Amino acid sequence: MKLYNTKTHQVEELIPWNKNKINMYTCGPTVYSYAHIGNLRTYIMEDVLEKTLNYIGYDVKRVMNITDVGHLSSDADTGDDKMVKSAKKENKTVLDIAKFYTDIFFEDLKKLNIKKPEIVSPATNNIDEYIKIISNLLEKGFAYQSGGNVYFDTSKLDNYYVLTNHKEEELISGVRESVEEDKNKKNKADFVLWFTKSKFEDQELKWDSPWGYGYPGWHIECTGISLKYLGEYLDIHCGGVDNIFPHHTNEIAQSEAFIGHPWCKYWFHVEYLNDKNGKMSKSKGDTLTVSTLEKEGINPLSYRLFCLGSNYRNTLEFSYDSVLSAQNTYDKLVNKIKNIKDNIENDFNKEDFEKYNGEFKKALENDLNTSSALTVLYDVIKADISNNTKLELIKNFDRVLSLDLLKEKEIDEELKKYIEEKIEERNSAKKEKNYEKADMIREELLSKGIELKDTREGTIYNLK
Ligand code: AMP
Ligand code: ZN
């Protein structure tokens, strides 16, 4: 498997620390608001990565955090805590807000067929872990106390900017936005490990620490949770490209200073979903969620297909037209597959199976080229091979694509009763030789997306 590694700035052969086992860490959502479909693009592509690794034979252990404390308005530790701000706005406690948005996040993952990582851990559950790491960093001289907070001293590292080729000045001003500079820092790039004398008097969640009552910074939570559950040798760390700096850069700094050796081999980053105003962003407020799509009649899996159609390293432009076009493709795809299923023969050709399965794997092993993998799926549907072989291939591909390609549309009891009554009525009309009425019933159902098919066993129906 070849993957682009942000750390080396090139596509590389994936060689895990430990043969066929892969430890994978994912930066989870900051649960102060609904996840937007941009965030979910990142989680869809990470899900495809995990499933691809499984498909080609790796044993993957994946961990994700839930950020419920410490993520400030600016990723460079300034501004308000996003959770506190949202709790105030909604007149709820921080923990209520966290629970509410975490639950919805997992419902959204389910709708998009994104597998929940094996371990999911909220930041607030691992305070002891952060205290242990920060104490060690202070002992070793990688951290200092200033103005009541504990900071990481980036000047102690030879190569702090390991993930980026940028110049320090550019990066710092890039993340600072319009927020004020923190005068307690020795170096501009230093970041907070622990806030004690917080300027936010109303910070709800605080814990005792050797440095006083306070709360952890955002970056230390991912280091703490990753080291706790995945150990000192991490294979793949994922996130959106906005996590590269400062979040992931800071994670590397503090993790490697703490463990004293290289930590994560591969850094996997997904590019932005943009809307007409640029990067879709929670803080801008006018973002689209899975529910917004559903209200517009868009099946969340059509959005998944839309994301799979583009390369994860390119920005993806959202528009309703393009997602509706993906929905059209999706519906056609499912119908064609249904047709294959309805015309199953009893022959399976191993050679054909290996050929197309090989092409599918090759596409994904080439830096997760999902659009080429979809092309292989379309080729299979068109190919001159047996339906049974096609079906086996589609079933296997869907272990990675997770588009429910073989799942029958669910039909509720009321609709089922209605269709059966209409079929009865049509049968009676036909018996009475009233073909005009029989045709009218067929047309009426068709206009509602219900297609009738007369077979020797009787009339059957398809939902389109
Ligand atoms: P957050 O909840 O803001 O911490 O972000 C959750 C994940 O979504 C992170 O991995 C971000 O890097 C990613 N993300 C944020 N905005 C976008 C976007 N517009 N497109 C793709 N991924 C994004
Ligand atoms: Zn993180």
Image (cartoon, rainbow, N blue to C red):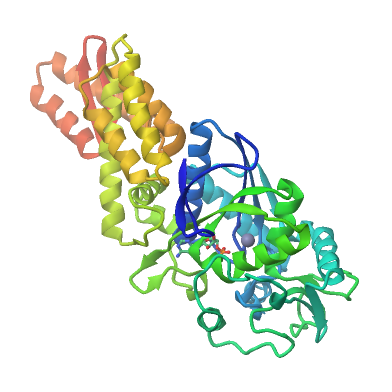
Q: Is residue 381 visible?
A: yes
Above or below, 401 relative to 426: below
Q: Nearer the viewer, residue 127 or 176?
A: 176
Seen as rendered, the residue at the extreme right is 210
Tell me the residue at 53%/34% (across/down). Answer: 54
Q: Nearer the viewer, residue 313 or 282?
A: 313
Above or below, 380 relative to 97: above
Q: Nearer the viewer, residue 203 or 299?
A: 203
Q: Which quadrant does the C terminus fall into?
A: top left
Tell me the residue at 40%/32% (across/down). Answer: 397
Tell me the residue at 36%/34% (across/down). Answer: 360
**Quarter of the view holding residue 339:** top left
- Where does the image place residue 137, in percent across and percent down from the top left? 81, 68
Q: Is residue 416 visible?
A: no
- Where does the image place residue 240, in percent across and percent down from the top left? 50, 61
**Quarter of the view holding residue 344:** top left
Number of numbered callouts drawn: 0
**Quarter of the view holding residue 139:** bottom right
- Where does the image place residue 72, in percent across and percent down from the top left? 64, 75
- Where does the image place residue 305, in percent across and percent down from the top left? 36, 46
Q: Is residue 203 left or right of residue 41?
A: right
Tell me the residue at 21%/29% (across/down). Answer: 382
Q: Nearer the viewer, residue 301 or 454?
A: 301
Above or below, 205 relative to 460: below
